[in-house]
């Protein structure tokens, strides 16, 4: 495929193709440490870690892993929130030649055991309060070593002294782990281990750097195999898209968790490779984040719609200075147009929607941040060196211009495949094209639009209904703080449209008012037939609303009603 109509819309600052460094991913830290040794790499709850310290700590961690027998291709899991130890371990594993397995700290024992067994991880780095959970499943896995750290390990005085009391009050536990046997303390590793450079393993760019597990909304989670080439390519694309940013000068707000590939690429890897400062947030809390923005003056703020919505709905947002923000790239879920406009008005920065998935490291498209046209409701243009097309679902047969079909992408950021799942790899990657499972279309200018996930499309009385379209209309109502639309079983229509709503604080919002609002903008068959008001909506750790869990709730409710009747 040679035709790329989107290239004519690229501003002068973005080249259509890029030169990628021929090196392993960890060389980005080596280079930044040499260029910016005294510069702050990580700010964490008042503690500053320089690039020199980050580099030395990563080498210590890598050397320690080697002493445990970890070598090229061995998987090592990181089960931490965003904190300095996460960054140190990420690069330490790569320096040792290993493969990172990012693991959600919120995982249950069952989910943790599954991921450790599936990945074959030989070691895991986890929080002290999560150690009991790891201990319970270790016998079911290939884990040989458990490295334990605590939030207090990287807090400044006196926070480090006080934190254990806070932790005991919040979690009701104090965990003591001794540095012996298969259990290891991160603090002891940093004290006892050499920070000497590690003899570089023979790493090819097509070797694995990361096993990124998908959310598993359909079936068991799959390990997405991302190579050094994949991650370097996507990082360089991201830097090119944000061409007005200056390496070594930007401050990046790290709210997106690193166990989600979006946060790992756009915050962790991009910041380190560019020599920028990361301000890490272990847990999203609107007031805490507003204070951080006010004090730390971040310039770049990758996020998700629910994060921006949470900040906008904070009653005291006007008391904080948010003017440092230059650019925000929103991902993981559709960005409502009204939220975009409100956030840009308050910060005076740019908030644009991007698009991607774990299988593409993750970004493939984004709207233009500073120059050029930004089209309402579009996910923007494909990134440099990225081909995109609309195919008939499940095939590589193109549809006519403007017709809805399955979005497919091809480029150097596309995964090697699924870990130990050749059949599923073959079904997802065809002729080099990654079939995304998302329905959308491309206009004549090369701008792409996501209509919805294939599995989220509602078929009501034979009509195709796309939840995103209805959600956009609902967000235009001044009383709606958050919403999600789902198709729930209906004996007559097959499926019916239901909207779940979180009211803005103090809003007197009724079902009748929303119905009237929707009828002004939507055809009758798209207007929600049922509404449910909630205090909050279920979300993933990255802030994506869990539509599927709401549908499962409805099905369970209907089954229970059948039994009763």
Image: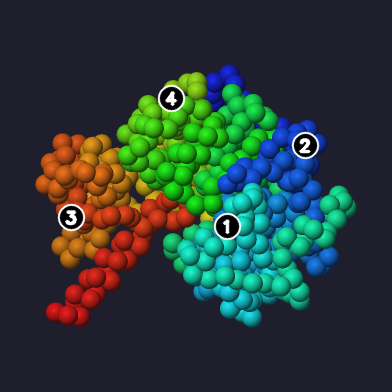
- Name the quadrant of the C terminus: bottom left
Instruction: Tell me which numbered mark, 2 or 1, is placed earlier along the sequence.
Output: 2
Tag in front: 3 or 1: 1
- Above or below, 318 relative to 195: above
Instruction: Tell me which numbered mark, 3 or 4, is placed earlier along the sequence.
Output: 4
Inspect this view and state whether residue 475 appears.
yes
- Name the quadrant of the N terminus: top right
Residue carrying label 2:
37
Instruction: Tell me which numbered mark, 3 or 2, is placed earlier along the sequence.
Output: 2
> 373 or 427, which lies in front?
373
Q: How far apart are marks 2 and 1 (CA)?
A: 30 Å
- Above or below, 177 relative to 486: below
> Circle 1 — which element?
helix
Picture residue at 24% right of the left edge, 74% below the top: 559
Q: Callout 4 environment at 10 Å: few (<14), some (14 to 19), or many (20+)?
A: some
Q: Distance between the residues labelled 3 and 1?
A: 49 Å
């Amino acid at each position: 495929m040679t035709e790329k109509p989107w290239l004519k819309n690229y501003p002068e600052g973005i080249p259509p193709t890029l030169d990628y460094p021929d090196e392993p991913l960890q060389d980005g830290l080596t280079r930044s440490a040499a260029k910016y040794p005294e510069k702050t790499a990580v700010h964490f709850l008042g503690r500053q870690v320089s690039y020199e310290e980050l580099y030395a700590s990563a080498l210590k961690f890598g050397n320690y892993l080697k002493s445990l027998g970890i070598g090229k291709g061995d998987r090592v899991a990181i089960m931490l929130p965003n904190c300095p130890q996460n960054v140190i371990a990420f690069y330490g594993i790569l320096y040792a030649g290993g493969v990172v397995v990012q693991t959600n700290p919120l995982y249950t024992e069952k989910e943790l055991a599954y991921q450790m067994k599936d990945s074959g991880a030989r070691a895991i780095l986890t929080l002290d309060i999560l150690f009991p959970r790891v201990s319970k499943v270790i016998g079911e896995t290939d884990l040989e070593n458990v490295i334990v750290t605590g939030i207090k390990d990287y807090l400044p005085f006196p926070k480090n002294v006080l934190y254990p009391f806070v932790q005991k009050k919040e979690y009701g536990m104090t965990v003591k782990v001794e540095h012996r046997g298969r259990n290891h303390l991160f603090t002891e590793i940093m004290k006892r281990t050499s920070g000497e450079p590690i003899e570089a393993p023979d790493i090819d760019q097509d070797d694995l750097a990361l096993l990124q597990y998908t959310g598993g909304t359909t079936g068991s989670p799959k390990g997405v195999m991302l190579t050094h080439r994949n991650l370097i390519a996507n990082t360089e694309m991201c830097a090119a898209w944000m061409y007005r940013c200056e390496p070594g000068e930007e401050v990046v707000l790290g709210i997106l968790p690193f166990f989600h590939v979006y946060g790992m690429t756009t915050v962790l890897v991009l910041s380190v490779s560019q020599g920028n400062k990361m301000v890490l947030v272990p847990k999203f809390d609107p007031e805490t984040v507003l204070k951080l923005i006010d004090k730390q003056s971040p310039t770049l703020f990758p996020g998700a719609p629910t994060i921006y919505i949470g900040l906008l709905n904070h009653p005291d947002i006007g008391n904080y200075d948010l003017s440092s923000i230059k650019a925000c790239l929103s991902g993981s879920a559709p960005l409502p147009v009204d939220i975009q406009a409100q956030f840009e008005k308050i910060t005076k920065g740019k908030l644009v929607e991007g698009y991607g998935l774990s299988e593409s490291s993750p970004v493939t498209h984004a709207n233009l941040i500073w120059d050029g046209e930004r089209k309402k409701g579009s996910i923007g243009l494909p990134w440099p060196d990225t081909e995109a097309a609309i195919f008939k679902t499940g095939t590589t047969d193109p549809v006519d211009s403007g017709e809805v079909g399955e979005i497919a992408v091809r480029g150097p950021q596309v995964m090697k495949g699924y870990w130990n799942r050749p059949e599923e790899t073959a079904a997802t990657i065809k002729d080099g094209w990654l079939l995304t499972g998302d329905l959308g279309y491309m206009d004549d200018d090369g701008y792409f639009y996501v209509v919805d996930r294939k599995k989220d499309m509602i078929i009501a009385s034979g009509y195709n209904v796309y939840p995103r379209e209805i959600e956009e209309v609902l967000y235009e109502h001044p009383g709606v703080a958050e919403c999600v639309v789902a198709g729930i079983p209906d004996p007559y229509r097959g499926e019916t449209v239901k909207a779940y709503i979180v009211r803005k604080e103090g809003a007197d919002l009724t079902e009748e008012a929303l119905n009237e609002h929707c009828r002004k903008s939507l055809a009758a068959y798209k207007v929600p037939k049922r509404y449910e008001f909630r205090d909050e909506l279920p979300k993933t750790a990255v802030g994506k609303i869990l539509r599927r869990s709401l549908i499962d709730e409805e099905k369970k409710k209907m089954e229970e009603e059948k039994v009763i009747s």
